[in-house]
Amino acid sequence: MTQNGKVYNYLIKKIEEDKCLHFSLIDPDLVFQTLSMIKKYARYSTEAGTDAILVGGSTIADQFAVDKVVNAIKEETDKPVIIFPGNINAFSKSADAVFFMSLLNSRNLYWIIESHIIGAPQLKLWGMEAISMAYIIISPGGTAGYVGDVKLIPRNKAKIAQAYALAAQYLGFKLVYFEAGSGVDQMVPLEMVKATSNFIDIPLIIGGGINTEEDAVKFSKTGASAIVQGTYIEKSVIRDKGEGLKKIIKAIKTVAKNR
């Protein structure tokens, strides 16, 4: 019988304690950023109180680069480093776990199951903890929506999002992730988050376009189990040495405990 892994157990325990977690997403792209920058992202995010560091992106990535990035990050943090794979070449055996994601609303079987068939045996050989996650992209979708050939969930159709999330739960996924797209100017609608978080019994993670404390607090208040920030990390934490992020994380946890 399959046992839950160390990282998954850590996440669930933290959600039970804090109600809402914070994940820092770092792109393993070494074309437009340096390892020195990436190490600072990890260091300042950790000092600010992030609960885990995700490594992944929708475009540029190869296993060599991902390995270098993961090892560099692990020098700067004691938090779990989790692969958030954009494709089968985006793994690293140095990571603590991988979000084994199925893009449920893709039109392309590759992103739903075919890439997983290719990647699963390698994860087995490495003995890596794989945490099943239903990945569902909401309009506008950004780069992830384009690359993943997604049939975007309309922003005014919360019931469709609810049904996807519940189906994911019944299929056995351990987590659900609603993504509006990296760097987009429209976040996942709050009413969709509230409706879905009250409808399912597994953690609901929210990402895409969350760039202010006010935005993050809204999601924490409406029932998100975790909030992901990537673009904000890249643009802000080196400049202010993580002080802004520290305020965001403190705020979302304070609000979550009172909901």
Image (cartoon, helix red, strand yellow):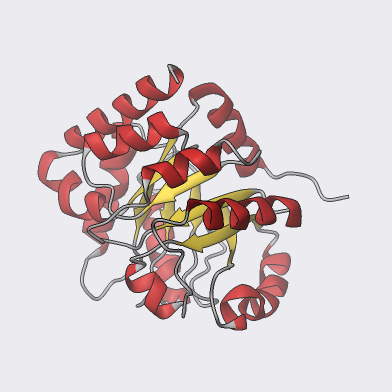
| Nearer to me, 220 or 167 | 167
Q: Is residue 11 visible?
A: yes
Where 101 sits versus 117, above or below? Answer: above
Q: Where in the figure is residue 182, as x and y percent of width and height?
A: 31, 62
Q: Residue furthest left?
A: 239
Q: Is 65 on the left-hand or right-hand side of 211?
A: right
Residue extending farthest to the top is: 258
Q: Quadrant of residue 26?
A: bottom left
Residue 241 screen position, x and y as percent: 16, 39
Tell me, yes or no, if residue 99 can be seen here: no
Residue 12 at x, y percent in the picture:
61, 34
In this view of the protein, which residue sits in the foreground, 73 or 151? 151
Question: Which residue does the image show at 28% across and 53% down from the upper left?
Answer: 209
List x then y, in percent, for residue 224: 46, 38
Q: Residue at x 25, y 56 (%)?
A: 231
Tell which of 238 and 226 is nearer to you. Answer: 226
Would residue 98 be found to the left or right of residue 143 on screen? right
The residue sitting at the right extreme is 1
The image quadrant of residue 55 is bottom left
